[in-house]
Image (cartoon, rainbow, N blue to C red):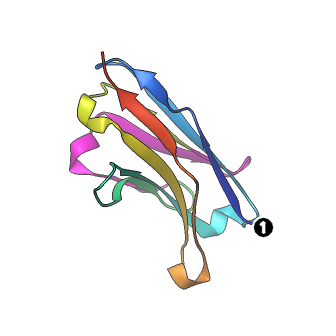
């Protein structure tokens, strides 16, 4: 059974930092691109950051470039999202996603999400 379990969300003031983590089980972790998405109620889910299988390449939404950093540890099947200089518009539910590197039809999994609220 595949599980992606996010942690690290919470309430933080503007300008603050949070680190989200996602622990994966039930998959061969190194076969998967890992991504973080976020969603605000009533809006579509959008890609925030992604990282390739061995961490050699990353990509970010324009809105978070220079503030967020994605990393992964294939030894313990985790992916992290370091979020700095948080803004109220970063408030959303953040979802961890694992997508098979060959084809998503071979595996495309989601966590249940963790809420990040940026407010004073």
User: With respect to residue 106, does 99 lie above or below?
Assistant: above
Q: Quadrant of residue 29?
A: bottom right
Give percent across and percent down for residue 12. Answer: 40, 21
Front-most of residues 77 and 119: 119
Give percent across and percent down for residue 102. Answer: 54, 81
Q: What segment is highlighted magenta in the picture?
A: 56-79
User: With respect to residue 42, does 118 lie above or below?
Assistant: above
Q: Is residue 33 visible?
A: yes
Front-most of residues 73 and 88: 88
Q: Quadrant of residue 59?
A: bottom left
User: With respect to residue 53, does 10 lie above or below?
Assistant: above
Q: Check residue 109 for magenta coloring.
A: no
Q: Is residue 103 visible?
A: no
Q: Secondary structure at mark 1?
A: loop
Front-most of residues 86 and 68: 86
Give percent across and percent down for residue 89. Answer: 24, 36
Outermost residue toward the front in this view: 42
The residue at the point 58 percent across, 55 percent down is 111
Q: Which residue is mark 1?
A: 1
Q: Quadrant of the C terminus?
A: top left
Q: Quadrant of the N terminus?
A: bottom right
């Amino acid at each position: 059974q595949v599980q992606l379990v996010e942690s690290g969300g919470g309430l933080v003031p503007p300008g603050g930092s949070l680190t989200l983590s996602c622990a994966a089980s039930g998959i061969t972790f190194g076969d998967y691109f890992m991504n973080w998405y976020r969603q605000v109620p009533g809006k579509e889910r959008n890609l925030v950051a992604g990282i390739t299988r061995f961490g050699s390449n990353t990509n970010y939404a324009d809105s978070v470039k220079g503030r967020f950093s994605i990393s992964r540890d294939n030894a313990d099947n985790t992916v992290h999202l370091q979020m700095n200089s948080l803004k109220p518009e970063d408030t959303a539910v953040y979802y961890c996603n694992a997508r098979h590197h060959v084809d998503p039809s071979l595996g495309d999994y989601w966590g249940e999400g963790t809420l990040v609220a940026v407010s004073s």
